[in-house]
Image (cartoon, grey):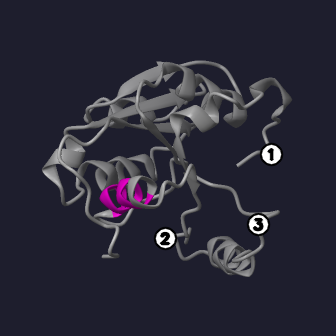
Amino acid sequence: MSEFGHIRKNVPLISITIPTYNSEATINLCLGSIFHQYDAEIISNIEVIVIDNYSSDRTEEICKRYRCKFLRIRCGKAHAREIGFLESTGKYVLILDSDMCMEKGLLKELVGYTEGCNFDAIIINEEFMQKSFVHIARTIEKKCYVNVPEILSPRFYKRHVLEKVSWKRIDDGWD
């Protein structure tokens, strides 16, 4: 844990938005990684908003086992992220994909860096957990982007940053 891995008491609300579409194979691991962070104070101060594009699998059933808001809306990923943000109320917003898992303690560390260093947004190192050829190739590709700011994009934001985003100008390629 970094020197900024500590946070003050009364953690501000963290909103986590997750677009989904037929995500039954991964959403349980994703949500499990969110709700199994180390710090009880962090867990009590998160809201999870799942924006589902009319999945035909068990995605909704799995999501309803967790403490999250489930919205079924026909839309692409970028629009789902906008909807998730607009539905959120947290001081911080974390944008995840349904196939992402967080390491234990990550939320506490993100808040600590944001508050301790006054960062507006944080890029999170991403690795794919699945071991198919495509996922291994994408993990290697992501590692090639380290220190290339034109390609990397943050996942954790202070709310005021996303309030300035012109969502209408963003297509589904935005990550």
Name the spot of residue 72 as percent of width and height, x first. Answer: 52, 19
Label 3 to label 1, Cα distance in Å? Answer: 16 Å
Instruction: Say if 127 sits above or below 167 in the image.
Output: below
**Disc 3 target residue:** 149
Q: Nearer the viewer, mark 3 or mark 2?
A: 3
Which three-letter amino acid code belongs to the residue tagged 3? Pro
**Mark 3 Cα shell of 10 Å, populated few (<14), some (14-19), many (≥20):** few
Counting residues from the start of the chain, the first of labels 2 and 1 encountered is 2
Q: Are marks 2 and 1 in contact (CB under 8 Å)?
A: no
Kindly state the secondary structure of the residue where label 1 is placed. Answer: loop
Badge 1 local density, few (<14 within 10 Å), some, or many (20+)? few
The residue carrying mark 2 is 129
Residue tagged 1: 173
Which amino acid does the dot numbered 1 rest on?
Gly
Residue drawn 71% across and 34% down? Answer: 78
Q: Is residue 105 visible?
A: yes
Residue under the point 52% across and 34% down: 159
Q: Which residues are magenta?
A: 106-113
